[in-house]
Structures are given as C-alpha cells and as structure tokens.
Amino acid sequence: MSPRHDTVLLDVDGTLVDTTYHHALAWARAFRSLDVDVPLWEVHRAIGMGGDKLVAAVAGDEVERQCGDDLRQRWLEEYEPLRAEVLPLPGAADLVRLLKDKGFRVALASSGKPQHTEQAVELLGIGDLLDAVTTSEETSESKPEPSIPETALKKAGGTSAIMVGDSTFDIEAAARMHAPCVGVRTGGFGVDELEEAGAVLVADDPRALLTADWDALAVAEAPKPS
C-alpha cells in the first residue's frame, strides 16, 4: 500500500469558488479590447492554466510577444467589476472543515492573483483552517507546471499530497509532482476529459466530495505524467 498523503492541495478558481466563467468573460473582453480575435469557447477551454501561459495557448506566441502583458493587465481590469458576483461553490467550506477533521493539512494551490485568492478565502470563511496559501505571485511558472502545488505542499509542511481541481491542468500539475488528483466538474470539463487526464475520482462539485472515501484517497497512487 502507498504511504498516506498527509496534505490536500485545493485549487481555488472553479474548484472552491464559482469563477471560471467570470474569468473566461474577462479574458475574452481583454482580447477584444486589443483587437485579438479569439472565440469565447476557446478562452474557456484554457481557464485553469495561469495567465502567463493562457495568451499564447489561445492566441499564439506572436500575440504573446506583441501584447501579452497588455492583455494580462486588461484581463485584471475587466475582471474587477465581476468580482462582486463571485460566490462559493456548494460544499466548498464544508469540504475544508471535513479534511481538517480527518487530520489532513490543507493548502490552497492557486494559479490566480493574491487578491482574488484572498477574496475566496474571505467568502468561504476558511482562513483559520488553512496551513498554507500559494498563488501565482510566488512561483516562476503556473499550472500545468507543478511549481504552485509543490510550493503549497512545502509551505504547509507536508510530505505527500493529493490535489483537488477542476481542470485537466490541475491533474497534469499534480501528476508532474507525483500526486493523485480528484477532479470536480465545476470548471466545465467533462467527466471523460478529467478521467482521461488521470483523475483518481471525478465528482460533480465540492459538496459531492463530503461523502467520498478519503481514507482510500489518502493512499491513492498518482498517474504517470503526460
């Protein structure tokens, strides 16, 4: 049997708070403001990776070279008024409490900006339950690179982790640090996509994970990284 994972790493946007489509809309508006033609559905498919990678992923390397920083600034500006509409996902705060009750260290491993993650923590009321919070500002590369979850695990003082995320990018980042990942459908990815990416379990939302077998998940094995 595999050694027990002592830490659960939680993605934030699309996993604990319902922000995936807010970010997709903000990015789409940012591209449009600079006359970059990117369909909204393609933007949505890239939500989950960090902004340092998203521009090139959906619009190409040349757009990244020419106006990547301007697009990221415009995204921040477009997202700001949408923040007032952000709500927690069902069961998110209860999931954090459950994990603490089961003896796990709990850390946030977010590709988002610090101010966005801070807002999520306040909305959920979980600040006193977290062992660590990591955002895009603390690492050189965002998901699907493993820098963010690796940093979160180290900050939490854990030795081995299981991750919970809403995108294939979360699953890939976890696999690259040899961690299994539970997928939730709240980011818009299908069950088949999350399973094919290597999720050890797929649930509809955080609330569905309240009845998951966390003793079994605590010894789950990581898939091989792609």
Image: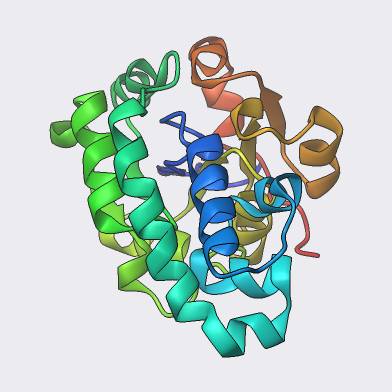
Q: Front-most of 110 and 37?
A: 37
- Scheme of image coloration: rainbow
State the residue lying farthest toward the left. 128
Q: Which quadrant does the N terminus fall into?
A: top right
Q: Position of residue 164 (x, y in %)?
A: 53, 38
Q: Tell which of 17 and 219 is nearer to you.
A: 17
When the figure is inspected, residue 172 is found, relative to residue 186, above or below; the finding is below
Estimate the x, y position of residue 147 in percent, counting from the top left.
Answer: 47, 70
The residue furthest top is: 211
Give the mark count.
0
Q: Position of residue 217 (x, y in %)?
A: 59, 31
Q: Quadrant of residue 137?
A: bottom left
At x 64%, y 18%, the residue is 204
Residue at (72% x, 63% y) in the render: 37
Is 186 situated left or right of 158 in this image?
A: right
Quadrant of the image containing the C terminus: bottom right
Residue 12 versus residue 55 in the image, above or below:
above
Q: Is residue 208 visible?
A: yes
- Residue 94 placement: quadrant: top left
Left or right, 54 with reference to 147: right
Q: Is residue 192 above or below residue 42?
A: above
Query: Do we see residue 157 in this rendering?
Result: no
Residue for point 69% across, 47% down: 40
Identified at 46% across, 35% down, the residue is: 19
Quadrant in the rendering for residue 194: top right
Observer-nearest residue: 96 or 25? 25
Q: Position of residue 115 (x, y in %)?
A: 23, 52
